[in-house]
Amino acid sequence: MTESGTRPPKWLVCALLGAVVLAVYAQALQCAFVNLDDPDYVTSNSDIQHGLNWHSIKWALTTSHGANWHPLTWVSHIIDFQLYGFKPAGHHLTSLLLHLANAALLFLLLNRTTGALWRSAWVAAVFGIHPLRVESVVWVAERKDVLSTFFWMLTAGSYVCYVDHLKRHISNFKFFYALALVFFAFGLMAKPMLVTLPFVLLLLDYWPLGRLEFGPRFSWGLIAEKIPFLLLAACSSAITFVLQNSSGVVASLSTVSLGERLANIPVAYVRYLAKIFWPSRLAVFYGFEHWNFYQVAGAVILLGWITVWVVRQRRVRPYLAVGWFWFLGMLVPTIGLVQVGHQSMADRYSYLPSVGISLMAAWGLCEWAAHRPRLLQAAGTAGVLALAACAALTPRQIVFWKNPDALFARAADLSDQDCVTCYNIGCMAMEQGNFARAARCFERSLKVAGKSAPKSFLARAENDLGCALLEQGRVPGAISNFESALVLQPAYPQAYYNMGRAFMTNRQPDVAVDCFQRALALDSGAAEIHYKLANALVQLGRPAEAMAEYSKTLQLRPALDEAANNLAWLLATCSDRSLRDGAKAVTLARQASEHGHDQNPLILGTLAAAYAETGQLSEAVATAQRARQLALDQNNPALARMLESQLRQYQDGDGGAHQ
């Protein structure tokens, strides 16, 4: 980290930096997709799998899929899928190249603004190969981190050019200001966490650009200069909050109380600091823990002491205040006051904020050792050893991202003594379809929690364990867990609902009906419960009641095509002719089919039956033929045989297909 000796050209430093990053992350190209958001973003997202065209660009610009508005992130995934398809190596390569570019741009930014080549190179190298970066670089669904940071770097670089041209009275300074705004907008369109960038620009104004002083000579003009950036940040924040809140990912105060959030904030800051200096036990998920008064107070005192210290040093060592407030400020959107999800912190959130701590370390050590040859040599050796440690630890962390099993096994190993974290990892495994691992996590959570945990938590864990067992076909065990949940929390509609699903799987629709009705007595506005009750009533031969429940389902959730299809089928084919309504069946089936772009053979079969009921046999024949061909194309021979039987009836002039 010393600045003495020969100074190589900047292009050579960038080349060496890139070579080191590529070498450290080489095995990332062998990692698979993981069943944690990757299906939503790539592998199961049909909207990104049709190449870059006007339709896909329009979708990227208008969708709120993933509970965020980040169209440039979607475009990057669309291009990647067009180039690489389902081959994960290509997707990882794009993220790695973006990360490499970010490290090089960070070096160029710091070197241009400070003139310190080796310190800038060290900060960029730590940024490039620190183990905390693995989650952002190797997780395909976190493309938004590396992509948004790329535009962050371009924004900061353009801003520095603007300041430089402004100081030298070069006329095109407005061009660079406009360019900075454009790059900032692009960054927000990749990930809204960049809303803190105007604040960082003010820090850069203070040091190293030297445009800002705190105190009587404070320049309010520099604040006014940031207003366009602040307006973009405000718009992005508003859009993000509305989308996340409407998508249900913003945790309510009943889920994570205000007290828990406030207690977690100082502790999370200290935990980030600890992991920057000692990156051990890194996990994909850090659940909320119950911090005691002394832990919270200790964290507040430590943060307060550092803050007071750097403020007092601001005139002689301005880089300390800039680095510290860079770290504190950039974490604000993700520190948990507005809680999104169930994590208390995340490695990916430190991607850019950690740069502030590296700045403090690099410039602080060099100044401390200045004019003392032995100390200077020791500081340089310490810097090299730190990089060597990162280069050794990062590949070990990448191994845990090799595949979903390795990732969840690691997460479970790190949280086996924390019932809440075990439970949340189980929820993630359930969402990604890994039901066996989910069951193990829920079982471990219940074991660790014991009987001292709140009954509501134990009931929820029992219920979710039952769901995991049910998905594996272990029906008796699932029913037992649902019963245990109801003993702990008798007014638990979800447990009654899931028990009803279990009895339906066990071919006991009469018992299932009772469970669904009990669930509705506690939660009459749940569309899925009305839908499942209707299905059970159909199996019991009670079509009139089933029709009423399907109708209630559609009142609550008009877009539930399965309910519309089943109701249309009853209206078209019910053995009780007084309950039939062919015209209504046609309307329902048409709407359901159009929602699926006429690609669902089952719904098309229902539409054919509705046409037959209304006497439109030619339309019934044509629709049934199309449905049969779709079933064959989708490798569903059983459905194709059923549709063939219906087709023959329509061709024979029989409007049959009745129950």
Image (cartoon, rainbow, N blue to C red):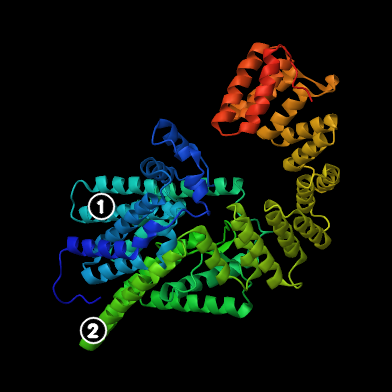
Within the image, what quadrant is residue 372 found in? Answer: bottom left
Q: Is residue 156 visible?
A: no
Q: Position of residue 116 (x, y in %)?
A: 22, 69
Q: Position of residue 221 (x, y in %)?
A: 34, 55
The answer to the question of whether label 2 and label 1 lie on touching residues, with beta carbons closer than 8 A, is no
Badge number at residue 162: 1
Badge 2 local density, few (<14 within 10 Å), some, or many (20+)? Answer: some
The kind of residue tagged 1 is Tyr
**Along the line of sight, the residue nearer the viewer: 75 or 83:** 83
Q: Position of residue 364 (x, y in %)?
A: 31, 77
- Of callouts 2 and 1, the N-terminal one: 1
- Image quadrant for the C terminus? top right
- Image quadrant for the N terminus? bottom left
| Looking at the image, residue 372 lies above or below residue 464 | below
Badge 1 local density, few (<14 within 10 Å), some, or many (20+)? Answer: many
Horizontal arrangement in the rendering, residue 622 relative to residue 376 (left or right): right
Which residue position is annotated with label 2?
377
Q: Position of residue 444 (x, y in %)?
A: 66, 68
Q: Looking at this view, name the residue that lies furthest to the left.
A: 6
**Along the line of sight, the residue nearer the viewer: 625 or 110:** 625
Residue that appears at 78% across and 45% down: 504
| Looking at the image, residue 90 lies above or below residue 655 | below
Residue that appears at 38% across and 36% down: 52
The kind of residue tagged 2 is Gln
